Image (cartoon, rainbow, N blue to C red):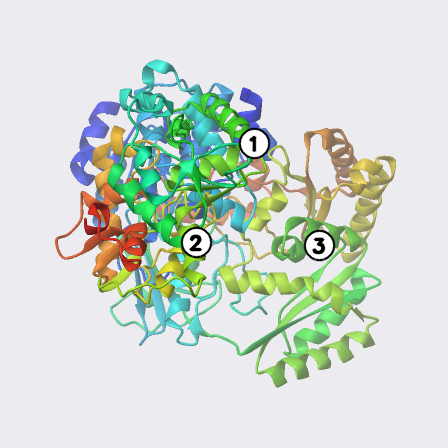
Amino acid sequence: MKKEEIIKKLSKIVGSDWVRTDDLSRYHFGTDVLTHFGQGAIYPGNQPLVIVFPGSTKDVQQVIKLAHQNKIALYAIGGGTVLLIGSIPGKANFGITFDFHRMQGVHIDEDRLVVRCQPGCTGLQVSQLIRDKNIGYRPYFGGSPGTSLFVPYQVFTGQNKMAGYLDGMGINCVTGMEMVLANGEIVRTGSMAQDGSPAWPHGPGPAMTYLPFFSNAGYGIVTQMEFRFFATPPAVGSLWVGFKTLRDACEAMNAIIRSEYACGATVMGPGCWTHALYSSQHWQEGAHFVKATQDINLIGMGFRGTKARVEYERNACIKMLKKYGGVPFPDWMVSILNGHEANAAGWQQCNSPKICGTFNGKHDSGGIFVSGGVFDTMEKLELFMKNGMDAYQSVCRENPEFLNHPHPIIRLYASCGQTYLSMGGHCNAAGEVIFVLDFASRQFLPMIGKIKAMFQQMNEEYGMAPLGVGRDVRTWTECPDHFSMAKIIKKAVDPTGIMAPGVAMPME
Amino acid sequence: MTKDELLEKALCCNRCGTCRGVVQDEVPDVAFSTQCPCSMTLFGAYEPSGLMYLARAIAQGDLKWNDDLAKILYSCTMCGYCDDFCQRGYRHTPCKVILEELRVIIPEKLKPAAIKKQAGSLDVPRATKLGVLTKYGIVEASAGKSAVVLFGDNTIISNAAKLEEIGFIIQKSGKKVGCFISKPLPPVSAALLSGGFRKELEAAIAAIDTRLEAAGVKTVIVYNPESLSVLKRFSRSNVEFISITRFCADMLKSKKIKTKKVKIGKVTFQDPCHLGRYSKEYAAPREIMQRLGLDVVEMWRTGYNSLCCGAGGGVNVNRPDLAKKYADNRWQEIKASGAQTLLTACVFCNANLRQAKPKNVAMVDITSVVAQALGYTGKEARS
């Protein structure tokens, strides 16, 4: 079908005002924060042929049916506040992009303790609305404050973040969704399966609700979603404890898990102080903090409840962790978390735009995923981390201006995520290690390159399975079993492959 | 600004999109969730981040100027919310400067005629009405005698009724104020930035600086917020520029000033972008309302989150359809506030909102309310 004909048919569905093909719209929907080199370009900008603004689930369904009949690729963007990956077409001048600006409905159901939202809502809108209600309950949101709640990958990260803050964060409060599949069929899951279905929160697992997470619209377009409320804790607290070795930290972590104290307890290897980066009052503060803790293995955790409970659990954990050689961080260090808590309270999320300030202290700064891999033994992981930090520090020592700049930071994520069957943009495999290097200026590129080369060499020495991000083909090959499973599901829900080709799955 | 400099600035935007709106309270309608007027179009390209991407594309040569791009650019009211919000919260994309630069570099043939005309706003009208000020003891500014002067901006320079009212207020204040009456200062305003005439504006303000310094002026009172904001921003002199609302608010603090009750019912205030966001003067109008004992109700989007009336950036002259749409949106909120009178402090807010005004809500300039409270019964106050 010719482009003009597509536009005509789309106009008939949504109205001619809501179909756009002007240069700037196409450019805008063909580029994002990661398509420019200065901001850590990971993939090229590709413009869609046309952008369509549906006003209802019915509009979405009709557009999808049209695309299905004519084998036209579909991409989606939620509230238009996407920071990272997932809505840029798989190739240039290709496909239809959905924009959900017209679908910003929010409905709070106080009886069922859920909030139902449309894809154009932003986390910020929903949070503020609920905050104003002041009923003592709130949902937990992950992702950036402006970040669209949908498309469904934009229910974004947060699953393994610290959960101890006032509002908490994470995707686990999603209880149901309405999704339009590639053939136009509408699927409703969980709490939205029937009117008045109970809204039980549950973690990622066999429930259909979690199927499309991180799929970047690869399985279908979510048109409504329900989030469960949780009681707002009267008090929150946090604890950060350093260890000599990663092994000590892991053993201490086991003890914490058995005790059932705390929430969101996470082991972090050297340089894993991402929370400070995400959450400190300003990026310089976070950057300095991360640099000051480069060599520290630590456990971070949160506490929620009454003031007495928070205090009791915190003290109990300190006592327990000390047995494993843990040293609690001094108050001045922890006080940086006030920023995090204020941030979480303000935005109900963790990856505030402040992370963008961190990520791009200046226009030409950005983040580079230096290296990564999956390890099969603890020893390999420890050796990799040790050598990795040595490599980083050697470059720092040789280049004092690099070291002293408030921005360049290496961050190390170890075993940081759960793997979702459908993940496309993210590669959080259990056991994975990723070194992320933020840089503040192009002048540092040679040093970044040097560090990167050292890591690559180590990867080869250790024979690790490499990791990649974004459209890197390795994203789809890092976990072959998971990817095979994802392909089976994809085939079942999208046999013609029109849903976001080249994003969640490689271009056929 | 070079293309590289423009690109450097534009790339600060990572499109988090939060600048387009903040929900202040309940969201009774989708329309109220936006703070950026352009975002009411619901098109990403019209939003601040879209315009930042426009700058990026132009600077990189990814897009060439055309009618569509010009249409999008001139839909922006340059209210400054995006810049202020970005600066307030996180990183700072200098949206204001970028938007102004885009209006400078857009090819001449794509500049709308109405926008081009704005260069003419620099000219002093042949027949000004500034002479009426002498009735109220305001004298010709001269060296050593005029520490405080009133700026004859483009909205009052030929408006005798308004000048009478302002003159009356100044007289009541008991302050010695001068004015460049016989040879007025160039009536600069932000309209020049909207038109892409930044260099001309800067040159005019440099000339103003010279004359102010020569006359030994310490303080300049400015009525038009659009003039106030550019004078504050571009003047290199040590002169303090204050709004007429600040002057009134300070005056009303004095116990010597007696005021009478003004019966205008429940009031709400429309913060002009150039008074609030650009000049950071949010307090003065509220101090005035409080001191006059008015029954004040604030709108959802107020103070630093105030919504633009829709007139700025030349939208009122170039895209009256959009200006009306933006005004309609504002009126929904004004009506919902339950106010019987809308107070403004800007001629352009007044004019743009008036076109969509419902019959049952009155609109009054806050200066007129002050004048009435002080006993003024002239034309402007009556209107």
Q: Pinpoint residue A262: horizontal percent, then vertical percent.
A: 63, 75
At 44% from the left and 43% from the top, the residue drawn is B177
Q: Given the image, what chain letter belongs to the residue carrying mark 3?
A: A
Label 3 Cα neighbours within 10 Å, binned few <14 / some 14-19 / many ≥20: many
Instruction: Tell me: residue A227, above or below residue A222.
Output: below
Where residue B43 sits in the image (x, y, percent)? 32, 38
Amino acid carrying mark 2 in the image = Tyr
Instruction: Give the alpha-carbon distance from disc 3 to disc 2, as whole Å.
Output: 43 Å
Foreground tag (3 vs 2): 2
Whether residue A90 is visible to the viewer of this picture, yes or no, is no
> Callout 1, which amino acid?
Glu
Q: Marks 1 and 2, Cα distance to the nearest angstrom?
A: 28 Å
Q: Which residue is mark 1?
A: B213
Pointer 2 residue: B282
Label 3 sits on a secondary structure element that is loop
Callout 3–callout 2 Cβ contact below 8 Å: no
Could you tell me which quadrant the N terminus of chain B lies in?
top right
Q: Give the farthest residue toward the top.
A: B109
C-alpha distance separating marks 3 and 1: 57 Å
